[in-house]
Amino acid sequence: MERYRGGDKRLREVSNFPGKFEGVSEMLYALIDSSSKYNFNKISSEEILGEVRVVTPKFELKNTEKMTKKVLKKLDEYKVDNVILSQTLLENKEFCKAMEEAQKRIITGHRIEKVMLLKFVTEIAKYTRFPKEKMHVLLFMNEYSLENIDLIERISQEVKEMHIISRNYTKYEKTKAKLFEQYGFVINLYPTDVKDDFRRVNLVINQDFKEEDLRKVDISKNAIVLSLNEKIRKIRNGFNGIIINDIDLVGDFESTKKYRDLALCEAKIYKPLRKLKDNERLLNSEKCIINGYIGLKGKITEEEFEKIGRTFA
């Protein structure tokens, strides 16, 4: 994906931060990394065509508050509200909390994954050689939003049956009734303390639950688990299915090992409050292609998908 071009209206439409849609920052985002190459008190920063890069020296957890203030000062100098953090900084909870309290939106790529979710379902069905119209899908989704209603409507018409576990499950009752009455789509809603058996589910999609919460639900030992929230290490004892923690995305953008390609993609093209189809159309115009899925041991092969697909019923 190309870097920001100042005259490109599409890219300049990206919003600053949820709740501040009336204004748009001059810069799209800042890449923030922690490196051992710099002395403790020095922070390096530069701006190239709308992309701000900030590099801090490596610092101990006890120095997080001091370093965070210095980083925020740099971000304010460049008038940047959207930030992409290297893995080391993402794992620093105090640093992330301070960013959020300062109204800096940490871009992770999770929202652009939501835009691509229907494409994921289609591709997984193709790789497993199991028709998606026969699939039972379980969605872990606490967030209640118009975007998620849009997501439910799009996926439910492609699969046989959809199950949703959410602390806001009652808020989706109208959507459930509407889709069944108008189209006959089957959606089952459950609270987070559900005790039901989900061993017929083929595909599990984790949007915003923690790993320990997923372990409490009785899912099939041969399911495919796609996590959009955090990396999942273990589901249950005896689990023989596939866990997908990341997407191998290729396209017209500069690749870097420090930051997820999906996060860069989201920073450049995603716009809150836009319909998923509109974001998807823009994603396609940027020639972003899914080149595979990343599991616990690296890229998942088609043979692995086929093997799991043979257990589906």
Image (cartoon, rainbow, N blue to C red):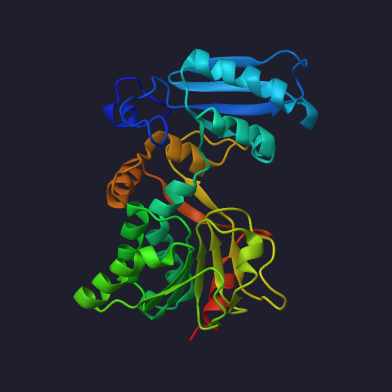
Residue 279 horizontal side relative to residue 260, left or right? left
208, above or below 183, in the image: above
Q: Give the camera-side residue of 209 and 46.
A: 209
Residue 28 horizontal side relative to residue 218, left or right? left
Q: Residue furthest front?
A: 170
**Percent x, y of residue 218:** 60, 78
**Percent x, y of residue 52:** 51, 21
Q: Is residue 60 visible?
A: no
Q: Residue at x 42, y 37 (%)?
A: 252
Residue 271 placement: quadrant: top left
Residue 189 placement: quadrant: bottom left
**Percent x, y of residue 129:** 45, 76
Q: Residue furthest bottom?
A: 313
Q: Residue at x 49, y 37 (%)?
A: 264
Residue 266 horizontal side relative to residue 42, left or right? left
Residue 214 placement: quadrant: bottom right
Q: Residue at x 57, y 16 (%)?
A: 74
**Image quadrant in which the N terminus is located:** top left
